[in-house]
Structure formats: structure tokens, C-alpha cells
Amino acid sequence: MRSITPPAVRVGLNSGVALAVLVGAMAMGGEAHASHQTSCVTHITDDLGRVHEHNWCNIKNVKYVGIKQGKTAVALAKGRGPITLTLTNSETVSNTKSSTITVTAGSVSTAVGFDVTKSRTKTMAASWAVPRGKMGTLKAYPLYKTYTFKAYSKLDGSYVGKGTARQAVGYAYTHSAS
């Protein structure tokens, strides 16, 4: 079975509507079904060599699921006590999106209300006193406002995939001593 959104097509300047009709006919004619759609994005090259991106899905059911901590530390301080470990640093953390289907960053950004491709630099500072004789570690992890969403085909309204968008908002700190 073929995907209803070809990865790249070369067409004339006024044939975007014809492509949409063709894709719609494929979906309705049984040759391909939106429920098997693998991408919400088609790149079409016109006669002048310009590439146009077309979005075949609607992003809906956006839900805020809370603030989540990133899995990878962005800064680390280590030392043997007695010492006060201090992290003072500027880090750049990026907003992100991930999904089970190819979706445009623009459609996700519009649905969740922030630019999922934007990075932001934040200054962080934290201190922790390491007990005498212990090796201490202080780590900083990014914090993200996290949203989930679902993608539905514009052709027949069927569900085609889901995803997550994360907006960088700050840092969480952890410390340990051994």
C-alpha cells in the first residue's frame, strides 16, 4: 500500500489543487487509506525550482501534561567536602517536538502556542554545601512545560498519529554525596 503523501513531487505552478484532488481520490478510491498515512507533510517543487511544503494534517487534542525534567544534565559541579559547590552558567536549551508521524513544526507550534524550534539561553545559579569527607555532585537539568497532541488527516478526518511538544522554562537541580 502506498502512502497518500509522496515525499517529493515536481509539478507546475498551478497544479497544487490537482495534487490535492489526486491525493484525495487515492484515499477515497481504496488505493491508500489515511489511517495508514505515514507523513503529514509533502514537499512539492514548482516549475521554477521552488519547494513548497504542504501540511495534510490537523493538530488537535492539545493537552498540557505538566512540567517535566529533561533526562540529560546540562551542567555539573563536583568536589570533596567540606566545600560549597556552585553552578553559575548560561545554557541554551531548545524547545522540542517529537511524534509518531512526520508533522510540520509550524502546525505544531500553532496548535501548542509556542515556537517548537526556538532555543533560549537562560542563566542558572545553584549552591550546595558538601559534607566533610564526602564527594559531592551538583547537577542541573532542563525543565520543560510538556504538551501532548494528536494528528488527524485533512482528507478524511481519521487519526494518523500523536506527539509531544516541550517548551524550555528553567532548570531543576539534584545533589548527591558519597
Image (cartoon, rainbow, N blue to C red):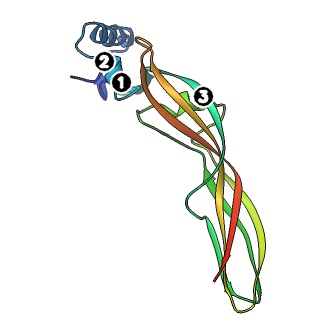
- The front one of 75 and 163 is 163
Q: Give the spatial CA distance, label 1 vs label 3.
A: 28 Å
Q: State the image coordinates of residue 174 (x, y, percent, origin top left).
A: 68, 67
Q: Disc 1 or 3, which lies upstream in sequence?
A: 1
Number of the label disc, if any, that sits on residue 156:
none
Give me the residue at 28% from left, 24% from top.
3
- The front one of 120 and 134 is 134
Give me the residue at 61% from left, 64% from top.
74
Q: Give the spatial CA distance, label 2 vs label 3.
A: 34 Å
Number of the label disc, if any, that sits on residue 62:
3
Work out which quarter of the rendered image holds the C terminus and state it.
Answer: bottom right
Tag 1 secondary structure: strand
Q: Disc 1 or 2, which lies upstream in sequence?
A: 2
| Residue named by callout 1 | 44
Query: Crowding at label 2, few (<14), some or many (≥20) Cα neighbours within 10 Å?
Result: some
Tag 2 secondary structure: loop
Q: As displayed, is residue 49 above or below residue 11? A: below
Give me the residue at 73% from left, 89% from top.
81
Query: Crowding at label 1, few (<14), some or many (≥20) Cα neighbours within 10 Å?
Result: many
Q: State the image coordinates of residue 170 (x, y, percent, origin top left).
A: 71, 54
Position of residue 170 in the picture relative to residue 76 (left or right): right
| Residue named by callout 2 | 11
1 and 2 marks in contact (CB < 8 Å) = yes
Q: Give the spatial CA distance, label 1 vs label 2.
A: 7 Å
The three-letter code of the residue at mark 1 reads Ile
Q: State the image coordinates of residue 19 (x, y, percent, origin top left).
A: 33, 13
1 and 3 marks in contact (CB < 8 Å) = no
Tag 3 secondary structure: strand
